[in-house]
Each structure stands twice: as C-alpha cells, then as structure tokens.
Image (spheres, rainbow, N blue to C red):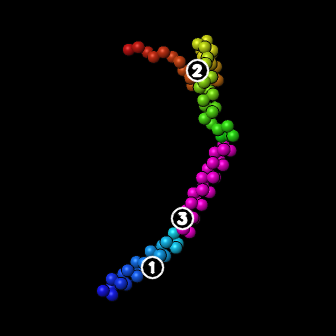
Amino acid sequence: MTAQIFKSILFGALFGTALFFMPFFLLRIVLFIVIIGALFRLFARRRFGPSGHRRSFTHFTDRIRSMSDEEYTAFKQRSQDRCGFYRSKPAESM
C-alpha cells in the first residue's frame, strides 16, 4: 500500500514538474520556428523581389499564348539563335 502511495506521489511530482517546465520548452520551440520562418521569407523576398516569381512566369506564359502563329514562329527562331538548344525539327517517321 505504501508503494502505491509513493508511486502516486512520484507520478504527481513528475507530472507537475512537466506541466511547470512545458511552457518554457514550447515557447523556445515556437520562437525558433518563427525566427527560422522569418529568415526564409526574408531571403526569398530578396531573391525573387517584391513582385514574387510566380507573377513573372504567368506573365511569360500569357504572352506566349496571346502570340499569333507568325509571332510564335519568330519567337522560336530568336530562341534558337540566342540559345541554340531549342530545336523544332519534326519527328522522323519510321
């Protein structure tokens, strides 16, 4: 019977200690995550600029979609002349 009482007292003491120190531990973890997240956002903002990178990709695709066939052919030709990697050869038939 005394063992059960000591177990209960020990469990209560450990539980109380955990409840006392848990907010400090959680506060450190939350602050760490917030600081790391802020640093990631800061460096991403510096890298991609204030407008973000998604807007520029969307603008580029909308520009290509709005081209006529002649403008698109000229665009592909300019890309091939500048970069040299764009090839619009037809697939060879077997």
Disc 1 from disc 3: Cα separation: 20 Å
- Which residues are drawn in magenta? 23-47
Q: In this figure, which residue is indicated by the disc labeled 2?
A: 65
Q: Is residue 14 above or below residue 79?
A: below
Q: Is residue 35 above or below residue 41?
A: below
Kindly identify the amino acid type of the residue bearing the numbered disc 1: Ala
Q: In this figure, which residue is indicated by the disc labeled 3?
A: 26
Give the class, few, some or many, for how many residues have Cα within 10 Å of label 3's Cα (few <14, many ≥20): few
* Residue 24 visible from this viewpoint: yes
Tag in front: 1 or 3: 1
* Residue 77 visible from this viewpoint: no
Whichever of labels 1 and 3 marks the residue nearer the N terminus, that label is 1
Q: Is residue 55 above or below residue 23?
A: above
Task: Verify CB contact (< 8 Å) between mark 1 and mark 3.
Answer: no
Q: Residue furthest left?
A: 1
Q: In this figure, which residue is indicated by the disc labeled 1?
A: 13
